[in-house]
Image (cartoon, rainbow, N blue to C red):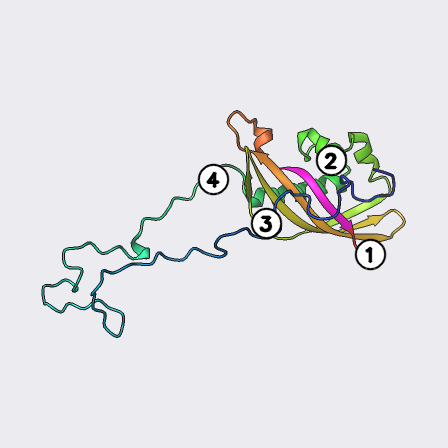
Amino acid sequence: MTAGEALPAPDQASGSVTGMPGQPGPGQVGPPQPPAIELPAGTAIDDEGNLVDLDGDGLPDAVDGQSIPPAPSELPSTPVTSDGPGADEAVAVVRAYYDAINGGSYGRAYALWSDGGKASGQSPQQFADGFDDTAEVSVEVMPPGRIEPAAGSRYIEVPVALAATRDDGSVHRYVGAYTLRRAVVDGATAEQRAWRIASADIREVQQ
């Protein structure tokens, strides 16, 4: 990265750098709907939608002796499990990244990129040099996307809005997102299982 650029990030082509689709794929969008309950032919239903017992045996007609599927509220809930750090931890990494930059701890910020900083596309010195004329960077972290699965990994996109104040007092504004990655394979180290910045798509806002 050349001197004068406020935010070191790998050069990217236009468009998303996540490798994930920007639109939902085929299938249901939104919360799952309760399963439909099919009643046998000939079932009697009153005006309020209740099953009617016409023969007085205590069971609704046409379902005598048959089991009625449970209502959705009676179905056992599926336990929620976690395979590692969630979205809040990913957001915390982005905040820690800018805390380190503003504190002049460029080595610590560099290490928050994947592969020990190599995912930034720069050497540690090049990374630090990119902030030579930057006095401060303020960051607004917006709600992250959902965690996306991949082979042996998880990805999440964290949108940001940035304001970089340079030594001459000028303020440059940027918007975009960081894509963070963590490993979920057996045998991965604690470092590999932690969220780290995999790529960035940060663009300067023309004023």
Q: Residues within 10 Å of mark 1 (few under 14, many from 20)?
A: few
Residue wearing tag 2: 120
Q: Which mark is on residue 145?
A: 3
Residue wearing tag 1: 206
- Quarter of the image for residue 68 reads bottom left
* Disc 3 element: loop
- How would you classify the magenta stretch by its main secondary structure? strand
In this view, which residue lies farthest toward the top?
A: 187
The amino acid on which the numbered mark 1 sits, given as a three-letter code, is Gln
* Disc 1 element: loop
Q: Position of residue 87 (x, y in %)?
A: 56, 45
The amino acid on which the numbered mark 3 sits, given as a three-letter code, is Gly
- In depth, the one of 175 and 162 nearer the eye is 175
> Which span of residues is magenta-colored?
196-203
201 part of magenta stretch:
yes
Q: Earlier in the sequence, mark 4 or mark 2?
A: 4
Residue wearing tag 4: 82
Q: Position of residue 177 (x, y in %)?
A: 68, 48
Rounded to the nearest angstrom, the CA distance separating label 1 from label 2 is 24 Å
Rounded to the nearest angstrom, the CA distance separating label 3 from label 4 is 17 Å
Of tags 4 and 1, which is closer to the observer? 1
Cβ–Cβ under 8 Å for marks 1 and 3: no
Of tags 3 and 4, which is closer to the observer? 3
* Disc 2 element: helix
* Disc 4 element: loop
- In depth, the one of 102 and 118 nearer the eye is 118
